[in-house]
Image: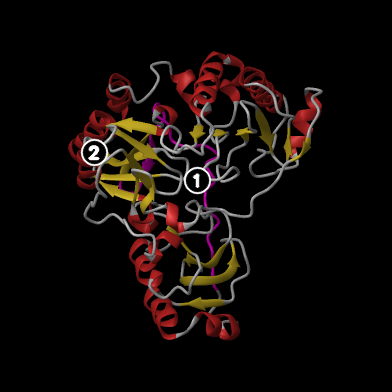
Amino acid sequence: MTQRFTPPEVKGWCPGLFAPMQAKDGWLVRVRPPLGRITVAQAVFLAQIAEREGNGLICLTNRASLQLRGFSHNNALRFPELAVLAGLGMANPEHEKRLALLVSPLTGGDRSCAPDTLECAAALRMALCHADNLSVLPDKFGFAVDGGGLFTVGLLKADITLQANGAGLWSVVCGNQKSKAAPIQTIVELAVKLAAAFTAIPEGKRPARYPATGKMLFQAIHQPYYPAEVTSAAVPDPALLAGSIGAALYALNAPLGILTSTMLRSCAHHARNGDGILRLTPWHSLILHGMPYAPHVADMVDTSTNPILRVSACMGNAGCAQAEGATQALAKTLAHSLGAGESLHVSGCSKGCAHPAKASWTVVAAQNGYGLIHNGTTSGPVMRFFPDDTAVEDYFIGTKPQERIMNGRV
């Protein structure tokens, strides 16, 4: 039997506050909380809206955004007004569109994170709001402010990243190149100039996907540049994704990035006993700070040894019309068969939205089964093909990791 991976529809845009997207389970809406954090009141608001207007499911994305699912079209169109009133978005759609901004999630709670990270993020956010010429940037073009610390410098991925460089200085990283260190305002201005230069490139390829673009942009604005250090880690150590991760810092991980309204409301209840802030990460964790105890939320991961922390999966055919097969239940079952240090990605199609990077094992749904890829992405060579998800489960459960590597090719 020949495997068939249906070419997915690449939309080239992401849903935003003013641009809901239709999915198989209804319309989904997205909020990008300012500086990657929400208050207790905002968390309760989102839980209530998810229950009342949607299907109660909330996705914590790899851009540290929140997606509420299962809305009717009318409810999706009404949502932006409610979100803006709750402080979860900008009233100006053009401003909102430009604020795809990741910020080190532990800033303010991690003493080893650059103390001026929030200052830098606020300055960049303000500059982006006023840069009307950046409205033509692709919807997926993103920025990051990386203060390092427990989540080490280089873990945040974006097209243009402002990285802490010690003693109040910062650098801009764009693709595989970086600027010399300079004060915040200088670096913010440089980041905006690089983004503007990108808009002038016909059909330009984003630096996050094509690192060589960075050199081209630095040259376009006549700025000196140097090779950027590249971290090989795609995600942090699992010890930072669940449980106690520092002084009064606690991470609660949403398995496969899926929260229910009940889970979010419970997180908000615990946050009331701390500093009242829920910090979002691009690794499916919410971080709470300041509680005198370790919080526990039903169905969320609070121990760093749980293998689900090394697993990625999209919604599959339960929520996406492009998906060829189920993913969520399969991913949770296969997680328990992973070897030490191994990672897994289960994708409903060859697009690989949940985890574009390599994984130890990638399982991709096709029209007539599932393909298995070793140490690759969804576009890698298939080493074995299975007729259904049960056959995949039997293979993982019945073989050891080394046997899968040695005997997997058919």
Residue 12 picture quarter: top right
Which amino acid lies under the numbered mark 2 shown in the image of this protein?
Ala
Question: What number is the disc on residue 239?
Answer: none
- In the image, taking residue 344 as reference, residue 379 lies left or right, namely right
The residue shown at (25%, 43%) is 292
The residue shown at (35%, 45%) is 59
Q: Position of residue 81 (x, y in %)?
A: 30, 21
Which amino acid lies under the numbered mark 1 shown in the image of this protein?
Leu
Q: Is residue 201 visible?
A: yes
Q: Position of residue 18 (x, y in %)?
A: 40, 26
- In the image, taking residue 183 as reference, residue 126 lies left or right, namely left
The dominant secondary structure in magenta is loop
Q: Position of residue 190 (x, y in %)?
A: 68, 22
The residue singled out by tag 1 in the image is 150
Q: CA distance from mark 2 to mark 1?
A: 23 Å
Tell me, yes or no, whether the highlighted magenta stretch contains residue 162.
no
Closest to the observer, 138 or 157: 157
Residue 311 picture quarter: bottom left
Q: Which residues are magenta?
A: 3-25
Frontmost of labels 2 and 1 is 1
The residue singled out by tag 2 in the image is 268
